[in-house]
């Protein structure tokens, strides 16, 4: 066969082959460089204002740094884990840890149950003015704690408070709620539940509306009661939503700080002081090394509790 027959027809070009490996690697390197260039502002801000302070506070927790050492921060002495031992052996810290555990163990289930009940009522029962109820339930979440404190101090006032006034109508002499060692913490738990359950309710409502109605209809055809359909069909499908709300609510409750600071200042007799509030007080006293060790103890507890929640509530 002659060489003329092997030539391409006039006007046609041979299709280009795959790019050379070197040109392809250059293109990938350019894309990587452009990506890092775009991410550089975030990385710089993250290192300067997040990672840097976190690592610095972790190092501080192993020193005896106090307020007087701010001018010479590198002249402090290392104390190992003495701050952690001192924090764990502090009676006030132990009391604060007990109060925080009490607040979480009682408050988180109450908040989640109230949120789920409200979400079910809005999804299944209330059809008119549903948006109005959503706004009303969610409004305390975005309301200032100072405004909420004013309202609840009026409600819980010992003499002229709304709650004690209503109790007096049925012959009950209500206590001084916020000044009682017995009732101060339950009062804060109820206030926190009222303030925070709206956020979990919105998430539960979204989860309920994402479940196909055919699931419940199938259970109804099989003769299951309303409770059986909710217990064995709806709740298992809500497991991811329950996990998310329990984790976020639990983390928030473990860090509870504003309620005792504004309402009771940790009293009476430290019966409402929390770990976050006691840590804040230690920072105010200038005990920076001790305060940061308390912060990291709380961080470890939050991580452990979150891990347990994921183990118990994850999808099986």
Image (cartoon, helix red, strand yellow):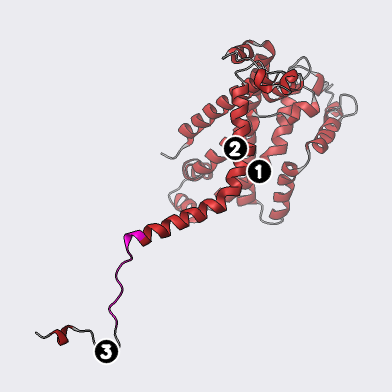
Neighbour tally class for label 1: few under 14, some 14-19, many 20 plus, Cα within 10 Å: many
Residue hosting label 1: 199
Neighbour tally class for label 3: few under 14, some 14-19, many 20 plus, Cα within 10 Å: few
Whichever of callouts 1 and 3 sits on the residue coming sooner in the sequence is 3
Residue hosting label 2: 248
Q: Position of residue 113 (x, y in %)?
A: 61, 36
Cα distance in 3D space between marks 1 and 3: 72 Å
Kindly report which numbered mark, 1 or 3, lies closer to the viewer in this rendering: 3
Residue drawn at x 49%, y 51% is 216
**Up/down of 126 relative to 16, above or below:** above
**Residue toward you, 276 or 178:** 276
Decide: marks 1, 3 in contact (CB < 8 A)? no
Q: Secondary structure at mark 2?
A: helix
Q: Position of residue 111 (x, y in %)?
A: 64, 35
Residue 83 seen in the current view: yes
Q: Secondary structure at mark 1?
A: helix
């Amino acid at each position: 066969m002659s060489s003329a027959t092997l030539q391409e027809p006039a006007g046609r070009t041979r299709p280009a082959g795959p790019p050379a490996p070197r040109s392809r690697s250059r293109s990938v390197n350019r894309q990587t460089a452009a990506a890092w260039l775009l991410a550089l502002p975030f990385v710089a801000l993250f290192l300067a204002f997040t990672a840097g302070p976190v690592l610095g506070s972790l190092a501080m927790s192993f020193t005896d740094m106090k307020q007087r050492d701010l001018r010479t921060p590198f002249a402090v002495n290392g104390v190992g884990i003495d701050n952690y031992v001192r924090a764990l052996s502090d009676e006030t810290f132990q009391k604060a840890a007990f109060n925080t555990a009490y607040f979480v163990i009682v408050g988180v289930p109450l908040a989640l149950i109230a949120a789920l009940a409200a979400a079910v009522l809005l999804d299944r029962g209330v059809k008119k003015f549903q948006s109005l109820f959503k706004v009303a339930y969610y409004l305390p979440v975005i309301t200032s704690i100072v405004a909420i404190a004013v309202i609840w101090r009026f409600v819980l006032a010992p003499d002229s408070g709304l709650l004690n006034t209503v109790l007096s109508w049925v012959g009950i002499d209500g206590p001084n709620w916020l000044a009682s060692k017995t009732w101060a913490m339950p009062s804060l738990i109820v206030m926190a539940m009222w303030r925070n359950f709206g956020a979990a309710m919105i998430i539960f409502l979204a989860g309920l509306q994402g479940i196909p109605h055919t699931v419940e209809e199938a259970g109804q055809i099989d003769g299951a009661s309303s409770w059986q359909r909710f217990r064995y069909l709806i709740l298992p499908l809500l497991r991811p939503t329950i996990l998310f709300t329990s984790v976020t609510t639990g983390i928030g409750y473990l860090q509870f700080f504003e309620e005792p600071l504004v309402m009771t200042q940790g009293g009476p007799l430290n019966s409402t002081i929390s770990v976050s509030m006691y840590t804040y007080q230690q920072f105010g006293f200038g005990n920076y090394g001790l305060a940061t060790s308390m912060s990291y103890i709380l961080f470890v507890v939050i991580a452990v509790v979150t891990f347990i929640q994921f183990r118990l509530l994850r999808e099986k």
